[in-house]
Image: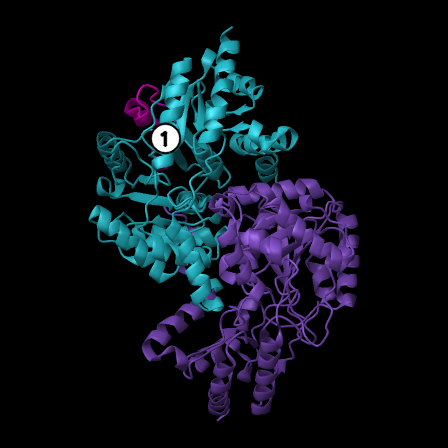
Chain colours: A cyan, B purple
Amino acid sequence: MINDTMYALGANRSVIRDLFEYGNERAKAVGRENIYDFSLGNPSVPAPKAVNEAILDIVSSVPSVAIHGYTSAQGSEKTRAAIVNDLNNRFGTSYTPAEIYITCGAAASLISVLRALITGNDTEILGIAPYFPEYRCFTEANGGIFKLVPADEKNFQIDFAALDTYITENTAAVIINSPNNPSGTVYSEETIKKLSALLQEKSAQYGHAIYLISDEPYRELVYDGAAVPFPPLYYKNTVICYSYSKSLSLPGERIGYILVPQTAINGAQLYAAAAGAARASGYVCAPSLLQQVIERCADVRPDLTEYIENRDLLYKALTKIGYKCVYPKGAFYMFMEAPGGDGNKFSEFAKKYDLLLVPGESFGCKRFLRISYCVSQEMIKKSIPAFKKAFEEFHG
Amino acid sequence: MINDTMYALGANRSVIRDLFEYGNERAKAVGRENIYDFSLGNPSVPAPKAVNEAILDIVSSVPSVAIHGYTSAQGSEKTRAAIVNDLNNRFGTSYTPAEIYITCGAAASLISVLRALITGNDTEILGIAPYFPEYRCFTEANGGIFKLVPADEKNFQIDFAALDTYITENTAAVIINSPNNPSGTVYSEETIKKLSALLQEKSAQYGHAIYLISDEPYRELVYDGAAVPFPPLYYKNTVICYSYSKSLSLPGERIGYILVPQTAINGAQLYAAAAGAARASGYVCAPSLLQQVIERCADVRPDLTEYIENRDLLYKALTKIGYKCVYPKGAFYMFMEAPGGDGNKFSEFAKKYDLLLVPGESFGCKRFLRISYCVSQEMIKKSIPAFKKAFEEFHG
């Protein structure tokens, strides 16, 4: 009398969460300072000052019932206005607050859009490797079919020949994630243009819109002047799933939004269905204090200095040792080829050195490992000898 | 290519939310001070001082990444420990943090438990009128069958003869809500004992546990010394769905918990399945700052003075005019018999006086209306002449 699917999802945590919990247990045993936990995308950079200043100011000056009361299900109108102002200023768009639905973070955004688009047990949702593995769980646990398009392991853009063969008449949406978790790469404008052309062609061929779901919590985390194309400017049937988890270092607070441009085909219906899905999933409103923080901080950008330093430090050290890594242009992940070519095996092996690296298989790239470098520089420095020993012992 | 069920849930808001949004629109037109909005259960009492003091202290003294970082999916261990300490102190139980799953409020708690218990499209979940209407939506949108047991309109306890006929071999759970929204009544110990006996008998008859889901966000809101029996002490297969929305006046913040006692049949599996369901619904963790607030405030109780004054003021005034009301012993709702016997009709009629009263049909009691008295006393006082005019004109 217990749902098997839900039981399996609860009993078998994601590989990432599993490694994180393993790290917590190890930390209890040998001390946190001796664990090199590169498992979780928990920002190491404090929230921008403006965030905590906003909290202090709101709590000190706004009446309690106004701070902590319910908002409309789609979120406070002022906060939605602040969000569209920021988007319109950056992208030359003219969105209105009615096109924004404030959510409890990117996972909530994605689930709401997916449940809105899954119309039967033949609905197909495509992801592109390497991908965030919860896309599969989010899709399958809500009645859809998830298909993973193999990675372009050369450039970590999109293998369009492969994608072409994966799209069928049942394809409701393609999910992309750029800057990418786990590869740290950013889809180029050329990639987005090609993707747009393919989706337009296939939508016409099958007689219905194939939506592009752009999951972009890392939009603000790009380096070396890399540009992140804004997909709705290229493909009108794009839905944005955003989160402030990474850009404002607020992953535990669960605050983000869905943008459903009303110029998208069936945009109003899709917005309403996403709202209905949020309701069916138990979302009443996004946390109200944090909504007010976003009202004040929608245009605040993260300080990237530490991530850039971490990336440079780690990339130089690992490649010097002999590891091969994808050079990250965004997010805070480095994708490393597993010595020996088997990410699972090397992840297990590395545990001996208390190096916690997420096997790439979970992301659809077996030969790789994900290293989250949103950690302290001290830990990175201390971990280098462990990486060196692991490399040498593995090869010796 | 849009899910019809989700669209309907999004396009057709709950009657309560609808009335609330109507009130917001009317307020823009004629001024907030001229609207007597009794629609929403948005606490009018500020959060206890300790809550905002805790926020200020945490934000001023705890490092940002520790405040705003991810917690384990089931919630911070310290917060779960604070919650079980409070429960154990009050109820003489010996729960451990492993039996608590921290959630984004009661709706999230309920959805997670329901998705854990719905195993097929024949799974039946029972509610008891008057009930919180989202139970139906939460159940049906997640693949189950919702059945509503008719109300005991005399005492607003449980009509056991009716409940007996509703339980079948497919019944997975019965949801109760005491102190009750919308009737304001509290289930007596006798009621809980009878319910326990019936569920034990039926569980034995059908060869599987029928769980009792006790949705109790109003546990702390009881008046006149009324006692709220703690259901797990009477029936071991009880799951508690709690929220701090009402007790700490934090409805917008979305923070609550599920208690799955490990002494319940298949308790460990049910806990894991609820965790899986939370994951499948896009919950990553409950808001982290608020978790830390609860760690400090799990034993803080609300100041009930204002609710008691409101209740007394409204009850006296309405009964003096001639309305018939159920005398509320808990929560912050008054259930009023609709003049003319039709709640929908009177709710529409009352809008003419800018009195926003929720029709009882949504709660399974057509003859009634729900009045949320968690509003300012000034509004209650100003509304009395409107109630009087409405009564007189309706009868004239």
Residue A365 image position (x, y, % from top left): 42, 22
Please identify the residue farthest to the left as the structure is shown: A92
Residue B309 in the image: x percent, y percent? 60, 81
- Residue B10 seen: no
Note whether residue A217 is visible: yes
Q: In this view, does B319 lie to the left or right of A218?
A: right
For this rendering, which residue is in front, B38 or A303? A303
Quadrant location of the N terminus of chain A?
A: top right
Residue A47, magenta (yes or no): no
**What is the x, y in percent for residue B168?**
69, 52
| Label total for image | 1
Q: Residue at x 51, y 73 (%)?
A: B359
Task: Check the image and report above or below for A385 versus B284.
Answer: above
Residue A394 vertical position relative to residue A163 in the rendered view, above or below: above
Q: Is residue A171 shown in magenta? A: yes
Disc 1 secondary structure class: helix
Identify the residue position indicated by label 1 in the image. Answer: A309
Chain under disc 1? A
**Residue at 56 percent of width and 30 percent of height:** A33
- Across and down, in percent, residue B102 comes to 59, 49
Judging depth in this view, the residue of A305 and B150 nearest the camera is A305
Q: Going 46% across and 69% down the picture, which residue do you hit?
A: A63
- Please, which residue is most extreme toward the bottom here? B396
- The amino acid on which the numbered mark 1 sits, given as a three-letter code, is Glu
* Magenta residue span: A149-177
Q: Callout 1 environment at 10 Å: few (<14), some (14 to 19), or many (20+)? A: few
Residue A395 higher or lower than B62, as above or below: above
